[in-house]
Amino acid sequence: MPESDYREQQLISDCLRGDRMAQKRLYETYSGKMMAVCLRYCKDRETAKDLLHDGFLKVYTHLESFKGSGSFEGWIRRIMVNTALEFLRKQNDEGYHLDVEEAYTLSNDEIGIMERMQAEELIQVIQRLPDTYRTTFNLFVVEGFSHREIAEAMSITESSSRVYLTRARQMLQDMLAKVK
């Protein structure tokens, strides 16, 4: 077993025993990456910090359910994404149900704009998307969810997921064209 896997298992074991220092190490180890996840789902840093806090409370509470199959970081990331989705569902009085219209597509030239941007700039632009579009974009493009998984997570149809993704891309294209 690689040393890093052993340290991770020991850290998990110590956290399960209620060791506060181990909990602090776990937080310090993963909070940076998980903050980036949270920032992708909300519009401001304070809300992202709240999501991060809530997510880590769930990590500590449900740590015994991590069975060691798959990546521990991936397991934490899934909790953070689900925490963000729960938050968005509570915030969105209208739900995710919008009328489905004709979708737009991006040309290869338009995609090139995104490739030239710095990650920080792109995150700032993505944060300006409406919640539904931003969430769909993040789940599909960043987290790798399928449209079926997005539909289940957001209580929408798969075709709505596709339309929201296309609209998010179109809005990003429009916003990025102004940045050029």
Image: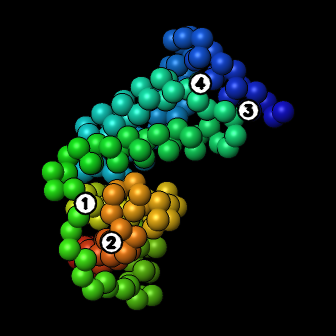
Q: Which residue is mark 4?
A: 64
The answer to whether residue 178 shows anywhere in this view is yes
Residue 76 vs 63, above or below: the answer is below
Q: Quadrant of residue 63?
A: top right
Q: Looking at the picture, which amino acid does disc 3 mark? A: Ser
Write down the residue under mark 1.
96
Task: Give me the C-alpha separation between circle 4 and circle 1.
Answer: 33 Å
Q: Does the rendering let one see residue 44?
A: no
SS at mark 3 in the image: helix
Q: Earlier in the sequence, mark 3 or mark 1?
A: 3
Name which of mark 4 and mark 2 comes first in the sequence. 4
85 in relation to 96, above or below: above
Of mark 3 and mark 4, the one earlier in the sequence is 3
- Residue, disc 3: 4
- The location of residue 90, given as percent across then percent down, is 23, 44
N-term-proximal mark, 2 vs 3 = 3
Q: Amino acid at mark 2?
A: Ser
Q: Which mark is residue 160?
A: 2
Spatial CA distance of label 3 from label 1 is 41 Å
Please name the amino acid that badge 1 sits on: Tyr
